[in-house]
């Protein structure tokens, strides 16, 4: 936990004083082990970052005087459209998405996505929230990724993808593509990137997406797992520094 994420309900009577009594307290006491008067990195969920001065701490809670004087980190220039991965991989990917500061993640269906994946309890809003929080705490972010679920491929590509990509390039990862994502001169510009399931998108899906808006790129000559592909794509462009 590189930042303590605060909730509005942590604050006492709308003041600058916050009190924490839940699982965050356990981490603060056992890992950070601060002294009274020490400054801790904090951020308001959905708001600014800053610091909190420890006023008191015991087994029942920690009281902090909060100063939120820094903006949240910049968002990543890429939004991600991802074929729903297997559940054990999904949690890792959500953390990675949060660490990179992706603003929007669209989880979509695909011919190679098993129907059972959509029944995973990891798709509940609470589980998605918890996975994203872990990534945000690691990367010192306060802004949560918007995660949207789309259970039908064709209506998503035909009706929603063009609107999502308005004024932005849409890249689709395909091993058979002739252009590499590393050769894209505009890789740091805002874009939407589509990443397929294990085995990739089927030819029909690629053709439909390309007909509508997408342009295919490959990620190299090796077959990558979905979580590695996500990291590879996001590493091509990084969000701006907070001070830029």
Image (tube, rainbow, N blue to C red):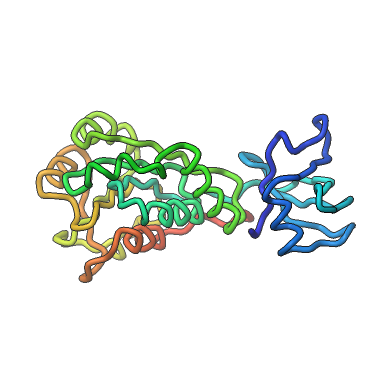
Q: How many discs appear?
A: 0
Residue 77 x %, y % = 44, 50
Residue 107 x %, y % = 33, 42
- Asked if residue 22 lies left or right of residue 143, the reply is right
- Asked if residue 244 lies left or right of residue 43, the reply is left
Q: Which residue is drawn at 62% across and 55% down?
A: 140
Q: In which quarter of the image is residue 209?
A: top left
Q: Which residue is drawn at 32% across and 39% down?
A: 119
Q: From this viewpoint, which residue is outermost toward the bottom?
A: 221
Q: Which residue is drawn at 49% across and 51% down?
A: 98
**Vertical placement of 119 versus 33: above or below?**
above
Residue 13 x %, y % = 82, 30
- Asked if residue 172 lies left or right of residue 66, the reply is left
Q: From this viewpoint, which residue is outermost toward the front?
A: 59
Q: Of residues 25 and 214, which is closer to you in this image?
A: 25
Q: Of residues 43 and 115, which is closer to you in this image?
A: 115
Residue 244 visible, this angle: no
**Vertical placement of 163 versus 33: above or below?**
above
Q: Residue at x 28, y 47 (%)?
A: 83
Q: Of residues 166 and 92, which is closer to you in this image?
A: 92
Residue 199 visible, this angle: yes
Q: In which quarter of the image is the C terminus?
A: bottom right
């Amino acid at each position: 936990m590189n930042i303590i994420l605060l909730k509005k309900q942590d604050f006492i009577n709308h003041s600058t004083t916050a009190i924490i009594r839940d699982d965050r307290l356990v981490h603060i006491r056992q890992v950070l082990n601060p002294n009274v008067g020490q400054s801790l990195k904090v951020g308001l969920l959905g708001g600014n970052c800053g610091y909190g001065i420890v006023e008191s701490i015991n087994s029942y809670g920690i009281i902090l005087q909060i100063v939120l004087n820094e903006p949240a980190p910049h968002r990543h220039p890429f939004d991600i459209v991802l074929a729903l991965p297997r559940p054990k991989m999904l949690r890792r990917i959500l953390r990675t998405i949060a660490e990179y500061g992706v603003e929007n993640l669209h989880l979509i269906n695909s011919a190679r996505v098993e129907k059972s994946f959509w029944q995973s309890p990891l798709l509940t809003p609470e589980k998605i929230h918890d996975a994203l929080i872990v990534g945000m705490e690691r990367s010192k972010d306060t802004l949560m990724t918007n995660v949207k679920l789309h259970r039908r491929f064709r209506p998503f590509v035909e009706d929603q993808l063009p609107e999502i990509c308005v004024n932005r390039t849409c890249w689709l990862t395909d091993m058979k593509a002739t252009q590499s994502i590393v050769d894209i001169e505009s890789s740091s510009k805002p874009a939407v990137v589509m990443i397929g399931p294990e085995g990739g998108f089927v030819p029909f899906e690629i053709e439909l997406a390309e007909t509508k808006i997408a342009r295919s790129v490959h990620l190299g000559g090796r077959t990558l797992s979905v979580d590695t592909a996500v990291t590879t794509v996001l590493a091509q462009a990084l969000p701006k520094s907070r001070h830029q």
